[in-house]
Amino acid sequence: MPVNKRPMRYAHSDGHTDVCYSEDGKYLITGGNDGDIRLWMGLEDDDPTSHCVGERALAVKQMGKRLFVGTDNNTVQAYTFPEVEPDGIITRFGAPVTHISVSKDGNTIAAASEDMEVHIYDVALQKSTVIASHTGPVFGVELDPKLEFVASCSGDGTVRVWNLSQNKLGHSWKCVPICNSFLLTKVLGRPSWLPSTGELLALPNGKQVCLYKRGTWEQMTTLTNAQVEKIHLQHLGTSYMIYPLLLIHTLYLHMLASSFDPHSSAQHAQNNEFSIVTFSPCGKYLAGCTIGGDICVWDIKQESCVMHEVIKNKNQVCALAWNPSGSGELGYCDLTGQLGTIEGCIPVELNSNLDGSLKRVRSGNCALHKTCTAE
């Protein structure tokens, strides 16, 4: 489908940069390694509103009349929106906050941290529930639309679904490279629920994205892109394709010469590995990005890739968000602090359908790809 990939622009200094849209889709909101958060009236805004909230602003999320920011002072700070005046501290961790998810009504807030914990904050009760399910830093968290589950991904190598009502682990997959630092990891492994119903959970896993059925956690299908899968082979060069022994010898010498942690698989992640996935507001499409700068959009019903774009300089994409207005726009940031958008990712006739329904998911003859290993 024809898309408009707008030129990227400077948003923050080098390092992890987060992006979200305001609930009405009017603003792009970014937080960066420089400790600032910025409100942009579109990508062309040359004078965004800027506020310093600390040394780093690693996570941003807006809902209702509040803006939530996770900083390196180990708290989730609430601000009024769009005034950005301090409005209280939501919860405190023992390490920097890495990601935030907020329910549609704004009454439930989930936050993840490098201290291996996920906090679920109830606005009405003004109380946090602590989930200490992971054994490594938590890279991302995503609330189930029905607030029955919460999904989280971690440097311990797993994506886990926690049953909130029963207060127990629902399911776990080993599909995230092991890494003991949020700022050093390449693959974030952030999952996404199908909007409204939560019928499906999408997980990035290597060169593909796996979709699982809610409750049974049965793998329904796998989404891939041929252009992404062949990128790694192209980088190897023609001579390596002809002389495989030369490739093995070269890789062996590289391992001997490099300073690497043998216990960290994240350092060996390939550029075509998916890091973040997110469903479109209508629930009919799924976007995913790789650590090599690829951004793909799949049609869930057809199980086909309808868009593949590569960002400037092929830098690692560290944040990806749909415009909730249904305009079909994707916002994203990379590790150099650049902000970009892609317009026209969804056909116009589907933009207004926000029921989050899924009419068909292939099963039966669909082989279950055993690439996400259940614990």
Image: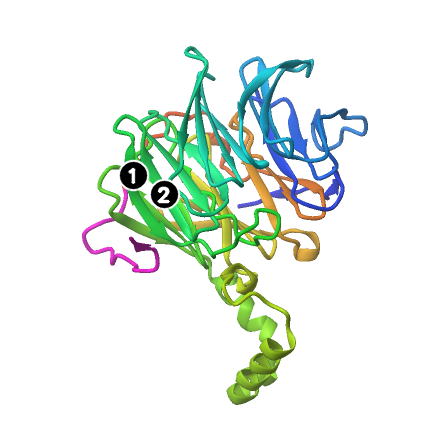
Using residue 122 as the reference point, say whether residue 337 is left or right of it. Answer: right
Q: Earlier in the sequence, mark 2 or mark 1?
A: 2
Under mark 1, the amino acid is Leu
Residue at the limit of the structure toward the right, as seen here: 47
Disc 2, SS: strand
Residue 31 falls in image quadrant = top right
Q: Which residue is mark 1?
A: 169
Q: Is residue 241 above or below residue 177?
A: below
Whether residues under marks 2 and 1 lie with C-beta atoms below 8 angstroms apart, the answer is: yes
- Rendered residue at 57%/46% (across/down): 182
Q: Residues within 10 Å of mark 2 (few under 14, many from 20)?
A: many
- Rendered residue at 57%/45% (across/down): 2
The number of numbered discs placed on residues in the rendered structure image is: 2
**Disc marking residue 160:** 2
**Disc marking residue 356:** none
**Residue 203 located within the stretch drawn in magenta:** no
Disc 1, SS: strand
Under mark 2, the amino acid is Arg
**Residue 371 located within the stretch drawn in magenta:** yes
Residue situated in front as seen by the camera: 263 or 174: 263
Question: Which percent across, then down, holds residue 375?
Answer: 29, 53
Q: Residues within 10 Å of mark 1 (few under 14, many from 20)?
A: some
The magenta span reads 361-375
Residue situated in front as seen by the camera: 70 or 102: 70
Residue situated in front as seen by the camera: 260 or 10: 260
Residue at the limit of the structure toward the front, as seen here: 94
Question: Which percent across, then down, holds residue 222?
Answer: 35, 53
Residue at the limit of the structure toward the top, as seen here: 124
Question: Which percent across, then down, holds residue 42?
Answer: 69, 28
Is residue 350 at all visible to an observer of this figure?
no
